[in-house]
């Protein structure tokens, strides 16, 4: 466990950058936080958050433990059950449901009602279950197609707006000796992103949500149509080879080196693409193109959250920390290009003057009329999401297995949602 020590630098940051966000309450004891912000950029943000909050409260000691993001998905239940911390990172919507049902997250409805989270009303529903609130959001981010603008220019390609244009661009990229898309599906969820977009573009947001709620059979012809569209790309050879052996980070060099031209990914990838040596003159972003002109554009925009463990020992400090993170000043700072590079949830926060953050904000504000999804492994119940993503990865590697995959997913749906 890492104890955040009080330093002059941290104190200065707290007073000059973020101090107005929360009053210096008389907090004492120890505040224990477990975070899954393990990638370098998010880790620095989380460490600074903890250090700044610690510096604001002389009698409080903040102990921060950062765990691997993928490992946390299997560790969180045990962490909340045995010697639980006070505050943890997690996700909104269905992903918090099992921990609410198990009594592991604290009901913080009273804090919402008391006005702790002014500016978050638009996303209150994503933190609501059984009419009660169980956490607070601190960031959200767009998904879309990040691509090598310089390669597009070399090949005379334009950003596609239709599926036909996407396919034509892909063929030109393949003809140039490159792959169209990089992807790493070793941890499965990246395949979920492709399914989300293909299904929302083929059948619409409402249908996608009905599937997530178990109201539509996986063997439905409309679901098969989604996979038929996906198979067009697979049969072309659009994706990098052996993607099931790579994590999403390990797939980045294919785009950085120009062996692949695009990545369907969340905006958190931009920092790593820049760190890999790509400039903003080489990078650009476009909204996943329309497939069915009769459905409106739905988007994935996952919301990341903080929750208080039901077994928290320092509830006063946990409440103050959540109010601090929810404030517009803090959300502006941590979501900026020097932080998470994402979008603040608080309506009173400022959106950073960054090309990709601004593009994402514009897209979600003006051209996501179909609806906003949280993401495959957040919108579907955990067990269905796990089984489903295994099937999606298998389809990308062995598309001829589709019938068997859909039968397995349908059997799982009938069992899980009963």
Image (cartoon, rainbow, N blue to C red):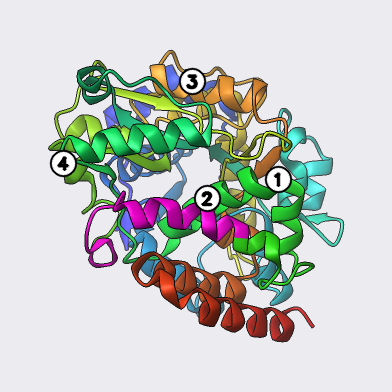
Q: If the image is split into quadrants, where does the C terminus sit?
A: bottom right
Where residue 256 sits in the image (x, y, percent)?
17, 36
In the image, residue 305 above or below residue 101? above
Question: Circle 3 sits on which residue?
Answer: 359
Q: Secondary structure at mark 1?
A: loop
Tell me the quarter of the picture where residue 277 sits: top left
Q: Secondary structure at mark 2?
A: loop
Where residue 138 sits in the image (x, y, percent)?
56, 39
Q: Which residues are magenta?
A: 225-245
Looking at the image, do the residues carrying marks 4 and 1 touch, with CB atoms under 8 Å apart? no
Looking at the image, do the residues carrying marks 4 and 2 touch, with CB atoms under 8 Å apart? no
Q: CA distance from mark 4 to mark 1?
A: 32 Å
Q: Is residue 136 magenta?
A: no
Disc on the earlier residue, 3 or 1: 1
Residue plotted at (52% across, 73% down): 386
Question: Circle 4 sits on which residue?
Answer: 259
Mark in the foreground, 3 or 1: 1
Looking at the image, do the residues carrying marks 4 and 3 touch, with CB atoms under 8 Å apart? no
In the image, is 126 to the left or to the right of 70?
A: right
In the image, residue 241 above or below residue 394? above
């Amino acid at each position: 466990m890492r104890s955040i020590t009080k330093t002059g630098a941290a104190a200065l940051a707290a007073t000059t950058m973020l101090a107005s966000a929360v009053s210096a309450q008389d907090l004492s004891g120890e505040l224990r936080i477990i975070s899954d912000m393990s990638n370098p950029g998010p880790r620095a943000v989380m460490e600074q958050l903890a250090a700044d909050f610690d510096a604001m409260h002389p009698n409080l000691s903040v102990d921060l433990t950062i765990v691997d993001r993928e490992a946390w998905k299997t560790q969180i239940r045990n962490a909340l059950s045995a010697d639980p911390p006070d505050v943890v990172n997690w996700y909104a919507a269905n992903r918090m449901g099992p921990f609410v049902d198990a009594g592991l997250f604290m009901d913080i409805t009273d804090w919402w009602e008391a006005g702790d989270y002014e500016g978050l009303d638009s996303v209150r529903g994503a933190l609501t279950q059984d009419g009660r609130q169980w956490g607070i959001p601190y960031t959200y981010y767009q998904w879309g197609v990040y691509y090598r603008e310089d390669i597009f220019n070399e090949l005379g390609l334009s950003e596609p707006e239709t599926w036909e244009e996407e396919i034509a661009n892909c063929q030109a990229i393949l003809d140039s000796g490159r792959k169209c898309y990089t992807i790493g599906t070793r941890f499965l969820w990246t395949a979920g992103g492709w399914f989300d977009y293909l299904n929302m573009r083929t059948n619409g947001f409402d249908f996608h949500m009905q599937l997530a709620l178990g109201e539509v059979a996986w063997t439905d012809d409309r679901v098969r149509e989604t996979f038929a569209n996906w198979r067009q790309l697979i049969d072309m050879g659009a994706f990098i080879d052996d993607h099931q052996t790579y994590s999403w980070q390990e797939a980045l060099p294919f785009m950085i080196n120009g062996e692949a031209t695009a990545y369907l990914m969340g905006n958190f990838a931009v920092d790593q693409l820049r760190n890999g040596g790509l400039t903003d003159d080489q990078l650009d972003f476009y909204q996943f193109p329309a497939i069915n002109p009769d459905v409106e554009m739905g988007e994935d925009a996952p919301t990341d959250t903080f929750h208080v463990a039901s077994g928290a020992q320092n509830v006063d400090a946990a409440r103050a920390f959540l109010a601090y993170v929810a404030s517009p000043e803090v959300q502006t700072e941590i979501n900026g290009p020097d932080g998470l590079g994402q979008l603040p949830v608080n309506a009173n926060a400022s959106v950073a003057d960054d090309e990709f953050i601004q593009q994402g904000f514009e897209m979600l504000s003006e051209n996501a009329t179909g609806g906003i999804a949280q993401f495959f492994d957040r919108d579907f119940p955990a067990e269905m999401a796990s089984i489903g993503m295994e099937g999606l990865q298998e389809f990308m590697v062995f598309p001829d297995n589709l019938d068997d995959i859909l039968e397995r997913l349908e059997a799982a749906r009938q069992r899980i949602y009963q």
